[in-house]
Image (cartoon, helix red, strand yellow):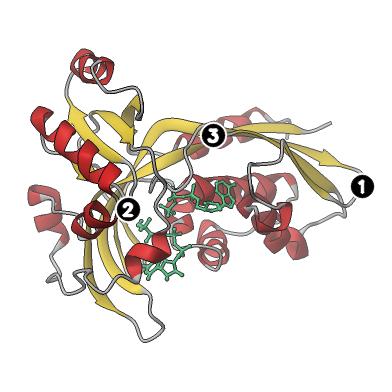
Amino acid sequence: MTELTLPAPGKLNLFLHIIGQRPDGYHNLQTVFQFIDLCDSLTFNLTAEDRIVITPSMNGIEIKDNLIYKAAVLLKPYRKSQQGVSVSIVKRLPMGGGIGGGSSDAATTLLALNTLWQCELSLDELARLGASLGADIPIFIFGHAAFAEGIGEKLTKVAPKAPYYLLLKPNCSVPTVQIFTDKHLTRDTPAIRISHALKLGGHNDCLEVVRRLYPEVDEAFLWLTQFGDVKLTGTGACLFLAFDLIDDAERVRASAPDNWQTWVCRGCNTSPTHDVLNQWIAQQPI
Ligand SMILES: C[C@](O)(CO)[C@H](O)COP(=O)(O)OP(=O)(O)OC[C@H]1O[C@@H](n2ccc(N)nc2=O)[C@H](O)[C@@H]1O
Ligand SMILES: Nc1ncnc2c1ncn2[C@@H]1O[C@H](COP(=O)(O)OP(=O)(O)OP(=O)(O)O)[C@@H](O)[C@H]1O
C-alpha cells in the first residue's frame, strides 16, 4: 500500500500591512511570509474504497468542515483512478493562532494527493484551487518564503534572515473575520516596495485592534516587550520574538507564565512539506 507522511508547517507574517479593501470586502495586503519548523504531521494512505477518511476527529470540527477534507474533495475530479484516501493527522499547530495551521494542512493535502492520485496539476493550478478555500493556502503551495501582495496570492520569493523564534499563544483564539471586519482596523497603510520591505521590514496593522479586543494578547504582548521587538502573526493570537541564539530563546521561554503555550522554533525559507515530498518522489521506483 502507498503511504506518504508529510509535515505541514506553520507560517509567520514577519509584518502585515493592509493597503486597501476590495469591493468584495477582502483586504489587499503586503506581507512577508516565512515558515517555521513547528509542524502538523499528515500521513496519507490510498484506499480501494472511494471515501475520504480523517483520523482522529478534530475537536469541534465536522469532517465536512475540515480543510483537509475540503482540499481532497477539490482534487477528486482530477484523479486518474477511483481510489479513496485515509489521512491521519498529528495536530501540533494551535487553531486560531494566526500561524495558518488549517491552511497548511489543506495545502499539504493538495500537494500529497496531486502526487498520489497522479492529478498532474502544476503548483500554480494547485495554488489557484487552494485560494478558493482560504487566502493563506497559496503560500504553503508556493513553498518558499515570499513577499505577498493581493490577498496573499501574488508571491515573490525572498530569503529573510531565519532566526530562532519564541512563539507564544495567549490563552485565547482570534477569529480572522472578527479582526478584518473591525471598524477601527487601519486599512490605508501606504504600499511599499519589496526592497524597502526587505531592508526595513514593517509592522502588523492588526496588532492594535487585537490588543484592544483580547486583553490576554495585550498582557502577553506587554510581558514579551521586555525581551525585544514583539510581533503579532496574521490576525493573532500568536506573538513572536526573534533570537540569534537558541539558548536565549529557551531562557525567555522558561520564564514565561504557565497559562501561555510557548514554543521555540526556527524560521525556514523553504517549506518542510516540499523538502520531504521532493525526497519521497526521488525515492520512488521509476
Ligand atoms: C491574516 C492572514 O493570515 C495573513 O496571512 C490571512 O490574510 C488570512 O487568511 P485565511 O485565514 O486563509 O483567511 P480566509 O479563510 O480566506 O478568510 C477569512 C475571512 O477573513 C477576511 N479576509 C481574509 C483575508 C483577506 N486578505 N481579507 C479579508 O478580509 C474575510 O472576511 C474572510 O471571510
Ligand atoms: N485541519 C484543520 N486544522 C485547523 N483548523 C481547521 C482545520 N480545518 C478547518 N479548520 C477551521 O479553521 C479555523 C482556522 O484554523 P487555523 O489553524 O488555520 O487558524 P489560524 O492559524 O488562525 O489561521 P489563519 O492565520 O489562516 O487565520 C479553525 O478555527 C477551524 O475551525
Mark 2 C-beta closer than 8 Å to ligand 1: yes
Mark in front: 1 vs 2: 2
How many numbered marks appear? 3
Mark 3 C-beta closer than 8 Å to ligand 2: yes
Asked whether, in this view, residue 84 is left or right of residue 285, the answer is right
Question: What kind of element bears circle 1?
Answer: loop
Task: Please tell me in which quadrant of the rendered image residue 65 appears.
Answer: bottom right
Under mark 2, the amino acid is Gly
- Label 1 and label 2: CA atoms lie apart by 39 Å
Tell me what residue is drawn at x 85 percent, y 54 percent. 81
Q: Quadrant of the N terminus?
A: top right
Is residue 153 shown to the viewer in this render? Answer: no
Tell me what residue is drawn at x 73 percent, y 51 percent. 118
Q: Position of residue 265 (x, y in %)?
A: 34, 26
Question: What kind of element bears circle 3?
Answer: strand
Q: Earlier in the sequence, mark 1 or mark 3?
A: 3
Q: Position of residue 77 (x, y in %)?
A: 76, 65
69 up-or-down from 24: above or below: above
Front-most of residues 108 and 116: 108
Q: Residue furthest bottom?
A: 23
Mark in front: 1 vs 3: 3
Q: Position of residue 153 (x, y in %)?
A: 40, 64
Under mark 3, the amino acid is Asp
* Mark sitting on residue 201: none
Q: Earlier in the sequence, mark 1 or mark 2?
A: 1
Q: Name the residue tied to disc 2.
A: 234
Q: Name the residue tied to disc 3.
A: 40
Mark 1 burial class by Cα count in 10 Å: few <14, some 14-19, many 20+: few
- Label 1 and label 3: CA atoms lie apart by 26 Å
- Label 3 and label 2: CA atoms lie apart by 18 Å
